[in-house]
Image: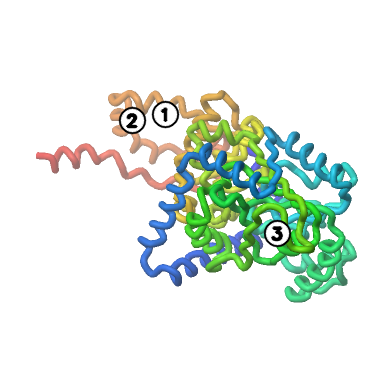
Amino acid sequence: MAVQSIDNFSKTLDPAVKAAVEDACICGTKARAVCFENAYANDAKVNELRDLSNAIKSTKISENLEKAIANLEANGVVIHYANDSKEANEIIEKILKEENAKSVVKVKSMTSEEIELNHFLEAKGYNIIETDLGEFIIQLRNEKPSHIVKPALHLKRQQFAKSFAEHNVAPYNDDPTAITLSARKFLRGKYIKADVAISGANYILAEEGGIVLCTNEGNARFCLAGAKTHIAIAGFEKVIPSAKELSVFLNLLARSATGQHITTYNDFVFGKGSAKNSPKKMHLVFLDNGRSEILSSDFSEILKCIRCGACMQRCPVFRKVSGHAYRATYPGPLGIILSPLLGDNLSELRDLPKACTLCGACQEVCPSNIPLPNLILKMRDKVKTEHLKVPNDINFFPFKILATMPWLWKFGMTMSSLANFVPLSWVKFGPLGRWNKSRTLPTFKGGKFRKWFARKAK
């Protein structure tokens, strides 16, 4: 019997990694709850903000996008459009060639992870350095992020120190302060020598024609301080009407992501800089990669995500398997819906919708109040209707027959008590056999509801 990829990954996952992920997720979820409680004693206020976030993201994206493009260009930003990962990478490479750039510094960007920009540019001979500490460690270890906000969620500080020593960043020292200072010292030289800075965009302000970068390490400012050219890449769902609405998202983002009241640095970038050391050119690449199709589909709500990662930290499956088990840029409940739709990856990731208990915890913490469980059910239905086979999938056809024939259902309920006399534990094969390896079925005590209801209805 074939087993789903995510199950196989979990079986072979290092127990230390499992413990690191679960501990980090539990701490992150508790920090979020405490932070919101300290800010708003009344849950109604938090829910009001969540509804506002959803409503703002519900405004017409096309109108906001048109306004954003016009105002960005008025501020001197060169706009590019990429249908997919290949086009986005080629556009960025073309800009680097035009600028005769060799050294590139990067601000944390999941959109660049989505198109695998680092691998593309490194293969072309460019020296590209991640400046976010977590992303820097991941780059040194040649791994992918395991979380969209905390990319090194699966690692302990001892592994940070070991990676620094192995790559001659700094001698081994697993003290957190020493790790931070070593990274700072190493990266300062990279900032100064950089020709181009590449970033994502947490938000794009349509009215003002600028982008907002939210960081906790100040690396965005350092990147933009020395580079001659700034390239930003983002999906069009990052566009919001204006800076007025930004306050809603800033109230929700950091509290949901890291349990802090606001990100330490919130940088507003309105085109090329006028200061002596700021970039003299700015480009913004709008990436589609399937987003247009998502917008016109039953899954459009997922584009309201503000990329906080709270759903992942709260998800019981993510806690047990880690982000790498999802085999995609976006893991967890978000990734179950988004990853199969981006770049036409449904066939490859068709098993992900089953990696969910439908407990609803993800929606409870989602700052945009996205109906994640409902979307996951729709994704399961999409996999089914497109006749994509999922390993270890259970055939529900017999249940369909039983559930759609009332007389057969009643007969089955009448006879169901006989299950207590059947030695089900002897079954060693199929779904029941796998179930019996670690569980036992309780004694059946049902089948009397209709008699009880008939008596009470008199």
Q: Mark 2 or 1 closer to N-term? A: 1
> Circle 1 sits on which residue?
399
The local crowd at label 2, few if under 14, some if 14 to 19, many if 20 or more residues have their Cα within 10 Å, is few
> How far is mark 2 from mark 1, CA to CA?
11 Å
Secondary structure state at the residue bearing disc 3: loop
Q: Is residue 203 above or below residue 353?
A: below
Report the disc number at residue 260: none
Q: Report x, y in % for residue 184.
A: 79, 69
Q: Give how far across and how far down residue 84 sits, in percent.
A: 69, 34
Disc 2 designates what residue? 412
The residue depicted at 74 percent of the width and 34 percent of the height is 87
Amino acid type at mark 2: Gly
Secondary structure found at label 1: helix
The tag earlier along the polypeptide, 3 or 1, is 3
Left or right: 163 in relation to 421: right
Q: Nearer the viewer, mark 2 or mark 3?
A: 3
The residue depicted at 47 percent of the width and 29 percent of the height is 396
Q: Nearer the viewer, mark 2 or mark 1?
A: 1
- Along the viewing direction, whichever of 317 and 411 lies nearer the viewer: 317
- Residue 218: x and y in percent read 70, 66
User: Which numbered marker is on residue 152?
Assistant: 3
Q: Horizontal placement of 364 versus 128: left or right?
A: left
Closer to viewer: mark 3 or mark 1: 3
Quick check: 77 above or below 213? above
Against 66, residue 23 (above or below) is: below
